[in-house]
């Protein structure tokens, strides 16, 4: 069914897997963020000692430090979450790559596992045509050969 388009399909599958493995780049590491939080906490404590008297400037600075610390903590949690998710995605991508290389993109027999792993959707366009959508958005429209038709 995919004669003559193996290279195109293999390239699309590899691009998808590379995207899954790479994910989005992190802005900073959790260690760097943790160090920034410690610095802000030290600054906050120093300003808190100075804030014995009512001072609008110090109050404003304390509020800014508190908000920045909160944002950094959220960013740290997000980075840790995406790192865990990235590890899971990398495992899945390696599993699919192993499956693809094991099937050698030219399967000699039908494999449910391969179909479930690489085909996202099959759309019947007409009696003679289908559209296959693979993981990653690669689509191919294929004419069905006469051997597949069933006359009722």
Image (tube, rainbow, N blue to C red):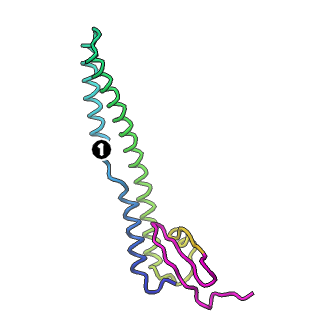
Where's residue 85, x and y in %? 43, 51
Identify which residue, 102 or 143, lies in the foreground: 143
Q: Nearer the viewer, residue 140 or 116?
A: 140
Point out residue 70 in the picture as x, y percentages from the top left corner. 37, 31
The residue at the point 58 percent across, 82 percent down is 129
Q: Quadrant of residue 63?
A: top left
Q: Specify whether 34 is left or right of 3.
A: left
Residue ID at (42%, 45%): 81
Judge from the rendering whether residue 99 lies leftward or rightward of residue 18; answer left or right.
right
Q: Nearer the viewer, residue 91 or 140?
A: 140
Residue 126 among magenta residues: yes
**Quadrant in which the C terminus is drawn:** bottom right
Task: Name the side, left or right, on which 21 lies relative to 29.
Answer: right
The answer to whether residue 49 is magenta is: no
Q: Residue furthest bottom?
A: 146
| Residue at x 41% of width, y 76% of height | 10
Mark 1, Cα crowd under 10 Å, few <14 / some 14-19 / many 20+, is few
Q: Is residue 118 above or below residue 6?
A: above
Secondary-structure class at tag 1: loop
- What residue would you read off at disc 1? 29
Image position of 75 (left or right of 146): left
Magenta segment boundaries in residue numbering: 124-152
């Amino acid at each position: 069914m995919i004669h003559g388009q193996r290279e195109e399909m293999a390239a699309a599958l590899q691009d998808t897997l590379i995207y899954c493995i790479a994910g989005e780049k992190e802005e900073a590491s959790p260690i760097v963020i943790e160090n920034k939080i410690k610095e802000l906490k030290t600054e906050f404590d120093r300003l808190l000692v100075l804030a014995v008297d009512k001072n609008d400037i110090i109050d404003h600075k304390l509020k800014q430090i508190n908000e920045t610390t909160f944002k950094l903590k959220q960013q740290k949690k997000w980075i840790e979450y995406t790192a865990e998710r990235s590890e899971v995605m990398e495992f899945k991508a390696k599993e699919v790559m192993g499956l693809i290389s094991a099937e050698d993109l030219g399967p000699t027999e039908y494999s449910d596992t391969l179909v479930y792993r690489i085909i996202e959707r099959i759309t019947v366009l007409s009696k003679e045509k289908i559209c296959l959508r693979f993981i990653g958005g690669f689509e191919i429209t294929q004419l069905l050969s006469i051997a597949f038709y069933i006359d009722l």
